[in-house]
Amino acid sequence: WNTLHTPITEPKVDGLVRPGDKLAGSSRACFLCLVRNEDLEEIIGSIQELEEQFNRDFNYPYVFLNDGEFTEDFKNAIRKALPKDRNIEFGNVAPSLWDLPPNINEEEFKEHMKKLGGIQHADQLSYHNMCRFYSKSFYHHPLLKKYKYTWRVEPGVHFYCKIEYDVFQFMQMNDKIYGYVLNLYDSPESIETLWTKTLSFLREHPYYLNENCAHEWIRDNVQKPNNYEITHGYSTCHFWTNFEIMDMDWLREPAYEAYMEYLDSQKGFYYERWGDAPVRSLALALFADRRRIHWFRDVAYSHFPYTNCPACPEDSDRCNGDCRPGFFVPWDNLEVENCQATWIKYIMDQKDLDMY
Ligand code: GDP
Ligand code: MN
């Protein structure tokens, strides 16, 4: 625990790639922004902070995706908001990857959503489309095929501190497939059958289970016994996917792909409100080696209503002073919606802790 209160500016590993180094900016990586035209102002806020704190030194490209058409005004405003030499691509999501799939009946969808009335976004068809797209399709998009890594960026988020090393190179050199900042509990009513269906998948494909997986993190029932009961065995702990740095080659492997096909056939993206966050998190917690998942504790990040503010050394000018802890500082508060303590307790070993 003490380790986690010590100031941190970056992981304590050898070989971090600095601005100006030969390898800086050389990963096959991009930022990914799925947005609508009306998100313009908020996404500009996000990418300008990201440029300021990180990317002006690394020059990674951007991919903007939309289920509708981006207007010329939108594209021009984005180009204007970013440095001139930034590579920026705009793309559409094919209806086949976005719209209600053939196995879903719209009337039945509406019936189910009446029952899920209290759950956030449950009555919004577009939100279900988005969750399915961010679970099973985005990494097949033609504009993303040439990339290995992507860093997901949402409208209206904040970055408060400089990141003075190439995070994609860090992922590559340390064999990481997934990076997150915040780790939360989910509303169990949105994923009532996700765990039992995942178990059916595992019974059919036991060979996908990784022997070094993070199963304790998704199975712990101590902090939220009620969640565990509603989901029949899933803690609901999940990586908060509005920030995520992913190795898409891992998603493109048979385990993840087969799991996505199976979940899609089980209809829970529409007849329940499965989020891409619990779906991705279960896949990672079962099929991946836990040591390939990295907590970017040093990244000062906020997406309403939660914020991660790393403790910085007293004399550090790395942070701009705007970082205010949100509802929690993730490694302090053992209650409410924070699940990081569970990750630390079961999953992190001494080697992980030494990195901080
Ligand atoms: P929340 O963070 O769970 O409240 O969900 P958001 O509304 O932030 O949506 C998650 C991401 O998907 C954000 O990047 C949104 O811009 C994007 N998104 C959500 N719904 C749509 C949609 O209907 N069309 C498009 N193009 N993007 C969407
Ligand atoms: Mn969001």
Image (cartoon, rainbow, N blue to C red):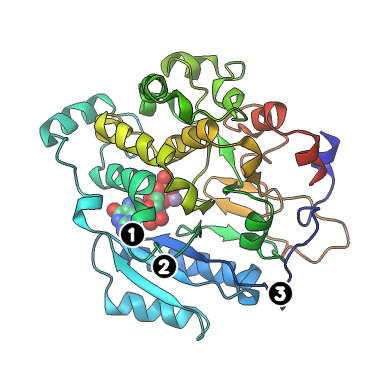
Residue beneath label 1, please?
141
Q: Give the numbered dot on residue 258.
A: none
In the picture, measured across the screen, residue 3 lies left or right of residue 335, that is right
Distance, label 2 to label 1, CA atoms, is: 10 Å
The residue at the point 64 percent across, 26 percent down is: 335
**Callout 2–callout 1 Cβ contact below 8 Å:** yes
- The amino acid sitting under disc 3 is Pro
Q: Of tags 3 and 1, which is closer to the observer?
A: 1
The reply to whether residue 120 is in sight is: no
Q: Which residue is mark 2?
A: 63
Residue 90: x percent and y percent? 34, 71
Residue pictured at 49% horizontal, 21% vertical: 234
Whether label 3 touches label 1, CB < 8 Å = no
Q: Is residue 6 above or below residue 113?
A: below
Query: Which residue appears at 36% of the width and 66% of the height?
Result: 143
Amino acid at the residue labelled 1: His
Ranked by sequence position, the earlier of labels 3 and 1 is 3
Asked whether 89 or 203 is in front, the reply is: 203
Residue at the limit of the structure toward the front, as seen here: 207
Element class at badge 1: loop
Q: CA distance from mark 3 to mark 1?
A: 30 Å
Neighbor class of circle 2 (other Cα within 10 Å; few <14, some 14-19, many 20+) is some
Mark 1 Cα-neighbour bin, 10 Å: few <14, some 14–19, many ≥20 = some
Mark-to-mark CA distance, 2 and 3: 22 Å
Q: Which residue is mark 3?
A: 19
Label 2 lies in ligand 1 vicinity (Cβ under 8 Å): no
